Amino acid sequence: MATPTGYRGPVLPIASQMPADAPDLILRPASEADSTRLLEWRNDPEARAASRSTTEVDSEEHATWLTAVLADPDRQLLICELDGEPVGQVRFDRLAEDRHEISVALAASARGRGLSSRLISLAVEKLRESSPRAEVEAHVREGNIRSQAAFRRAGFSPSGKEADGFLVLVA
C-alpha cells in the first residue's frame, strides 16, 4: 500500500456540529453478525469502483477477511447506524504508531443524504478518544469527486498524490 512519505503534519480538529434536527448517527464495533451486510456493501458496484480492489469478493474470501480484521489489534471496523439501522462502515488500519488510514463505505440506500462527512467526522473523533495524537489519512480515487468533497467537509485536506491515481487527504 503506497502512502505519502514523511507526512508529519499537524493534527487538525474535526468539526462535527450538526443541526439539532439532524438524524442520529452512532458507531459500534462490527462483529461476525455483520458479515452478510458488509459483504453486500463491499460488492456494491459503486463501492467497488471507488476501492483499490475493484473485483467482486465471494463469501468465503470475505469471511476469512472479516475474521482476520476483527482479530487484528491494528485495525478497527465499525458499523454506522442511522436511527438504529446500519447504513455504512468505517475501517481504520494502523500504518504507524500514530498514523491510520480510514476507509468508508455507505450502503447504496444511504448515499446522497449528506451522511458521509458526518460519518467520517464521527469516526475520527472516536479514534482520537483512544489515540489523541492520531493522524488520519484517506486514499481517494482522483475521479471520486463526491468522496473527496465528503472528506474535505470532514476537515481533511490534500497532502499528495499516489502513482496509482489516488489522492491522499489528511486530518
Image (cartoon, rainbow, N blue to C red):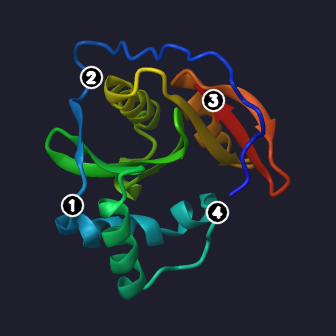
Query: Mark 3 — residue?
Result: 170
Residue 40 placed where, x, y %?
A: 36, 70
What count of labels does the image hold?
4
Choose the circle earlier in sequence order: 2 or 4: 2
Q: Amino acid at mark 1?
A: Ser
Mark number displayed over residue 22: 2
Choose the circle earlier in sequence order: 4 or 3: 4
Q: Quadrant of the C terminus?
A: top right
Choose the circle earlier in sequence order: 1 or 2: 2
Q: Secondary structure at mark 3?
A: strand
Query: Mark 1 — residue?
Result: 31
Residue, x 43% and y 47% (percent of image)?
A: 111
Above or below, comparing residue 155 to residue 113 in the picture = above
Q: Are marks 1 and 2 in contact (CB under 8 Å)?
A: no
Choose the circle earlier in sequence order: 1 or 4: 1
Residue, x 52% and y 61% (percent of image)?
A: 47
Left or right, 15 with respect to 37, comes to: right
Nearer to us of marks 2 and 4 is 4
- Which is more toward the observer, 159 or 105? 159
Q: Residues within 10 Å of mark 2 (few under 14, many from 20)?
A: few
Distance between mark 1 and mark 4 Cα atoms: 23 Å
